[in-house]
Amino acid sequence: MSVIALIRHGQASFGAENYDCLSPIGRQQAELLGLDLRDRGLAPVRVFAGTMARQQDTAKLALAAAGLPLEVETDSGWNEFDHEQVLQVHCPEFADRAAFKALLAQQDNPKRFMLDTSYQAFQRWQSGQYDGDYTESWSAFCARVSAALSRAQHIANDKQKLWVVSSGGAISAVAQQLLGVDNDRALQLNWHLVNAGVSKILASKDGLRLSSLNDHALFDKDNQLVTYR
């Protein structure tokens, strides 16, 4: 039986000019993850990541920390969806920091407003009723991720171990496929995936089985390392 360790990237730079780079905490998470996976006997024979910097850098830092001289292979099928577009289509103020800050200032509970608005934006995208508003529909995104998973399954033969570094949306889409849950449950899973958390997939001739989801026990001793963005 082969093992695919499906890894969420380390913490990105939320609120910075360039979100798609690891924060100092994200770099620390990636290094600790590499050591942990190596010590658990999950050193890989091949490593894949999407094209995004936060995914590539998580993979490279984890490998370096584990002392594993492997190249990171790129598969764009593991890229995250365009979350900025999903938010902006539903709430145009998301596209302008000043406008969105002003909108938040009008709310009695800005944090709740932010959460509710984000949730509504993702539900709108998932509904399939407005696919023409998006560069990539929810169904197309799920199909893309499913194809990437099939490629990994094909590669993971002869009891090999693979690492795949991706993002929350893609991992929740995989979980939805393997667990058979609905869109709302997949969205809930996405919100609770921890940076550098690991979901372990077992691959055999009988197919794929999700053995664990969102494992981040290595961060239990330091709650500052448990992040979600």
Image (cartoon, rainbow, N blue to C red):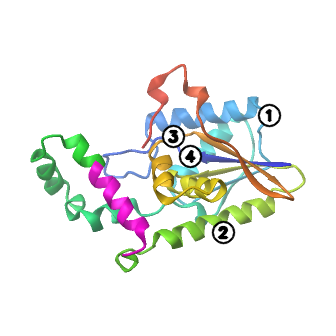
Q: Is residue 155 above or below residue 33?
A: below
Q: Earlier in the sequence, mark 2 or mark 3?
A: 2
Badge 4 density bin: few <14, some 14–19, many ≥20, Cα 10 Å: many
Comparing 140 with 52, the one in front is 140
Mark 4 falls on what kind of element? strand
**Mark 4 and mark 3 in contact (Cβ < 8 Å)?**
yes
Mark 3 falls on what kind of element? loop
Comparing 70 with 171, the one in front is 171
What amino acid type is highlighted by mark number 1? Gly
What amino acid type is highlighted by mark number 2? Ala
Inter-mark Cα distance, 4 to 2: 18 Å
Q: Earlier in the sequence, mark 1 or mark 2?
A: 1
**Mark 2 and mark 4 in contact (Cβ < 8 Å)?**
no
Residue 8, numbered label: 4
Q: Which residue is mark 2?
A: 147
Q: Position of residue 101 (x, y in %)?
A: 16, 49
Q: Position of residue 191 (x, y in %)?
A: 44, 46
Q: Please name which of the two marks, 4 or 2, marks the residue nearer to the observer.
A: 2
What amino acid type is highlighted by mark number 3? Asn
In the displayed image of the protein, which residue is found farthest to the bottom?
A: 132
Residue 41, numbered label: 1
Q: Earlier in the sequence, mark 1 or mark 3?
A: 1
Question: Which residues fall within the magenta stretch?
Answer: 116-129
What amino acid type is highlighted by mark number 4? Arg
**Mark 1 and mark 4 in contact (Cβ < 8 Å)?**
no
Q: Earlier in the sequence, mark 4 or mark 1?
A: 4
In the displayed image of the protein, which residue is found farthest to the right?
A: 158
Comparing 36 with 93, the one in front is 93
Inter-mark Cα distance, 1 to 2: 27 Å
Q: Position of residue 193 (x, y in %)?
A: 51, 43
Mark 1 falls on what kind of element? loop
